[in-house]
Image (cartoon, grey):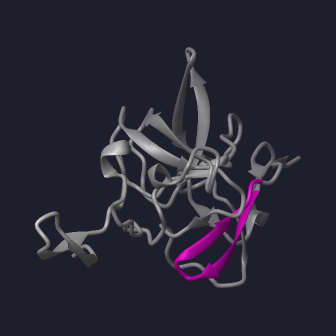
Amino acid sequence: MANKYIAQQLTGALAEVEFLQTTAGLADAGKGIGTNAQGVLDATLLPAGVGLDVLSVVSSEALTAGRLVHLWNDGGTLKVRHASAAGPGYLVANGFILDTVAVDTPVNVYKNSGANNTGVTGLTPGSVYYLDKTVPGGVILDPSAFVAGDIIQRVGLSYLATGLSFEIHQPVVKA
């Protein structure tokens, strides 16, 4: 159920009104705002250049919420797919998503270091995580089993069992 507030209408009557979670622009001027399903303000509610660096990008495969993603050039069009540490042809993590989407669907990609990925589960708070090579876009605690050609990319620190502070680190190709 969406959070609501009481507002005075033009007639003088009081009415319940839902907080906006996204905005279409000028038509929403003066309306109350609230957090979205992830507990944060949607990027549409912030002025350009403020807050998280979020891109709306079309998926080139079905994507799972909370997973790390790789941005890539598909014939001149920016697209997004799951990141992977598996070599050869590894896909460096340069963002994450909070929504599950089908192929050819726009999705918000959060790509700032320090952004909180609240779409993860089962993490150990206070632990460093690395990009996984077996679960597409997943994270792993210990990459020591990786083999030559895989990459080791630190991707964040968990602050809760359901929260990863995403960090973009330079990957290292395992020899």
Of 53 and 106, the residue lying toward us: 53
- Residue 45 point in image, percent of width and height: 46, 54
Whether 101 is among the magenta residues is no
- Residue 123 point in image, percent of width and height: 58, 78
Q: Say above or below: 69 vs 40.
A: above
Q: Residue furthest top?
A: 75
Q: Quadrant of the N terminus?
A: bottom left
Residue 114 is drawn in which quadrant? bottom right
**Badge count:** 0
Of 143 and 107, the residue lying toward us: 107
Q: Residue furthest right?
A: 175
Left or right of 20, for residue 15: left
Of 173 and 114, the residue lying toward us: 114
Q: At x 45% / y 32%, what residue is drawn?
A: 60
Q: At x 36% / y 37%, what residue is drawn?
A: 105
Q: Say above or below: 31 vs 159.
A: above
Q: Say above or below: 15 vs 94.
A: below
Residue 42 is drawn in which quadrant? bottom left
Q: At x 83% / y 49%, what residue is drawn?
A: 170
Of 171 and 13, the residue lying toward us: 13
Whether 166 is among the magenta residues is yes
Q: Main secondary structure of the magenta part?
A: strand
Left or right of 124, for residue 62: left
- Residue 115 point in image, percent of width and height: 64, 62
- Residue 132 point in image, percent of width and height: 64, 58
Q: At x 27% / y 78%, what residue is drawn?
A: 5
User: Magenta stretch?
Assistant: 154-168
